[in-house]
Image (tube, grey):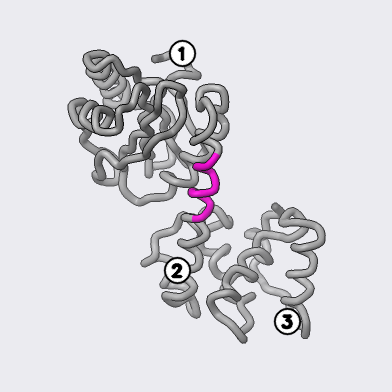
Amino acid sequence: LHSTAETMTPPPHSAGHRARLRARLLEAGPSALAEHELLELLLATAIPRRDTKKQAWALLKRFGSLARVLDAPAAELGKIGGVGPAAIGALKVVKAVAGAYLTEPLRGADVLTTPKAVFDYCRVAFGGTPDETVHALLLDSGNRLKRAVQLSRGTIDQSQVYPRRVVEEAIAARAKGVILVHNHPSGRREPSAADERLTRDVSSALTTIDATLLDHVIVGEAGTFSFREAGRL
């Protein structure tokens, strides 16, 4: 995608502009459109018969990129003029659909052989929330995704997770492997001392039910951190 957040004055609207954008999208794919053009088309599905270019540029100016627009809290999106409940709903649906789309490869394959698919899914599904949340991906004996569950939701900088809760969820799903995932709303992706301690405690607790902690992934603004890839698990 071509970032357009740097230039904040929208060009004048012309007749047939939206139809031409759709034609380019269908003929050449999303890479043929700039971020503000993709956002404009998306908003048009929720705001019919109106020019949505102004709202698209305003959202990019406020949040900086299309990804950050999709991650933004509904209350913050609603502060942009002309972005009402229908438009906010459309933005949230797109993120939810993206998460569901990225889940599919995890269900039919050994996730340890497709780490990029795991990281992509984690960034879409768990990134961008204002509070720290902790989730568990519960896997079968072939390391295929059975279920994803939220373990806790905390404040902007911490969330409490008890190893026994992870064990209970693993037993309920008859899981043999677990991948912990949590986000850092601060944006950093490096693990804290508490993250290190949680990893050790959960790994130890899972051995009591013959299950394995396969990874602990931290989602930050700059990307993801994997305990497994870093050789710290």
Q: SS of the residue at dot 3?
A: loop
Q: Residues within 10 Å of mark 3 (few under 14, many from 20)?
A: few
Dot label at residue 89 = 2
What residue is drawn where x is 31% and y is 18%?
A: 211
- Above/below status of 55 relative to 129: below
Q: Which residue is mark 1?
A: 231
- Taking 227 as reference, is 201 left or right? left
Question: What amino acid does circle 1 point to?
Answer: Gly
Q: Nearer the viewer, residue 193 or 67?
A: 67
Is 55 situated above or below 118? below
Q: Which-is-in-front pick, marks 2 and 1?
A: 2
Residue located beneath label 3 in the image: 13
Measure the alpha-carbon separation of dots 3 and 1. 53 Å
Q: Is residue 42 magenta?
A: no
Instruction: Nearest to the eye among marks 3 and 1: give it.
Output: 1
Q: Which residues are magenta?
A: 97-104
Residue 178: x %, y % from top left:
36, 26
- Where is residue 62? Give x, y as percent: 51, 63
- Image quarter in which the C terminus is found: top left
Contact (CB < 8 A) between labels 2 and 1? no
Q: Of the two numbered discs 2 and 1 on the same chain, state the one appearing first in sequence.
A: 2
Q: Amino acid at mark 2?
A: Gly
